[in-house]
Image: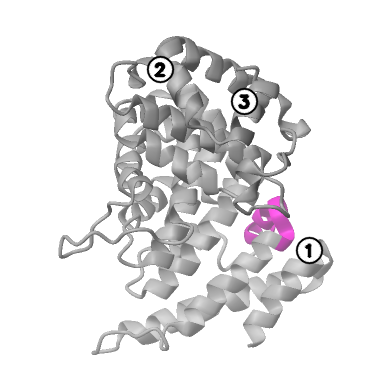
Amino acid sequence: PLMESLSSTALTCGMNFQPWALETFELAMTMIESCTMILAGAEDEIDDEEADPIVCAADLLDGLVEGFGENFGALVSSSTRFAEYFPTVLHMLTSHDVPGVRMSAFALLGDLARQCPTVIQTALPMLLSEAILCMEPMHESVCNNAVWAVGEVCAKCVDNSGALAPYAEAILEKLIPLLMGNAVDDDGQIIGNVAGLSENAAAAVGRLAKCNAEFVTKDLERFLMGWCGGMAKISDKTERRDAFEGFILAIRAKPQCIQPTASDIGDTITSILFAVVTWHLPEDNLGPQLLSGPYSFTPFPQEYAELGQALISLLHDLKSSVGNEKWNHIEGIMPVNVRKLMREVYHL
């Protein structure tokens, strides 16, 4: 409870927590170090309860990251005892035997990538390797956090795609089953949908595509509809923006992934259209009447106007590529309010 309270306090106070920050940081690191040494001598398999102090210490570090933001790097550097070893400790946490520790470690990794990426720069190869290994939904929370953390790393590598190049293929291969809902467990049984996982996977693929569209185009046909389904469920607007921007880049890089003669072309176009529609959903009216009752779709967010124009251009090109006959069929099965939205906002 003490470390949980300190984590919440550090997060809430931000830089006002600075007088106690170094002592708190070293408290958390010492707790991880001490518990790791004690558990290393255990003869039996370590359970979640025994590793709970490590989890709380990792969460405390995460609270400091969120509270201090980019200044967390200076806090780490100010520790004469732990500055040099912090990346190594983080790597140890991401590869820990206990799933709960790995779950907290990947939450910490994602927040470090988002807030203070310089701290993990030297250890990025081994941290990404561990994250990729954990992008399996046998441990759902671990997988979810690992996928989210990889997405945050990708977001920081948009101007440095070379750093991701050695890992891009492995990342995509792990993300595709998560998007398509056909990931399997150790016994070969399909795990199915895991709450939040397809959304995180869709955002991660989009951010990977923003680094380099060629990272995702090789097998784009395999997961295009799954990507659309994941994008449609993303609630965070920044993650949704990144997913759609990457999606557009991928389609532009490989337009032949949408074949007018393919048997599922109607389903593919419909998936894209309904993903686009989610930008217009009102927060207080998500019932069935939204599609066929009084028109209540909202305008495209003004802060993402450039993305909105890119989507208009993409949809027009898709319409031209499939031809009027196929497009008229697709339009004919749209709910009336979706047809109106496409006509009035996207000029289709």
Say which residue label 2 marks. Answer: 326
Q: Is residue 190 above or below residue 291?
A: below
**Mark 1 residue element:** helix
Q: Earlier in the sequence, mark 3 or mark 1?
A: 1
For badge 1, the amino acid type reads: Gly
Q: Residues within 10 Å of mark 2 (few under 14, many from 20)?
A: some
Say which residue label 1 marks. Answer: 14
| Residue at 71% from the left image edge and 31% from the top image edge | 304
Q: CA distance from mark 1 to mark 2?
A: 55 Å
Whether the magenta-drawn stretch holds residue 74 is answered as: yes
Q: CA distance from mark 3 to mark 1?
A: 44 Å
Q: CA distance from mark 3 to mark 2?
A: 16 Å
For badge 2, the amino acid type reads: Lys
- Where residue 347 sits: x, y (%)? 65, 17
Would you identify the image quadrant in which residue 305 lies? Answer: top right
Would you identify the image quadrant in which residue 95 lies? Answer: bottom left
Is 69 placed left or right of 229 in the picture? right
Is 307 placed left or right of 31 in the picture? right
Q: Earlier in the sequence, mark 1 or mark 2?
A: 1
Q: Residues within 10 Å of mark 3 (few under 14, many from 20)?
A: some
Majority secondary structure of magenta residues: helix
Point out which mark residue 237 bears.
none
Work out which quarter of the rendered image holds the C terminus and state it: top right
Closer to us: mark 3 or mark 1? 3
- Where residue 1 sits: x, y (%)? 63, 88
Say which residue label 3 marks. Answer: 342
Closer to us: mark 1 or mark 2? 2
- Where residue 152 sits: x, y (%)? 54, 46
**Mark 3 residue element:** helix
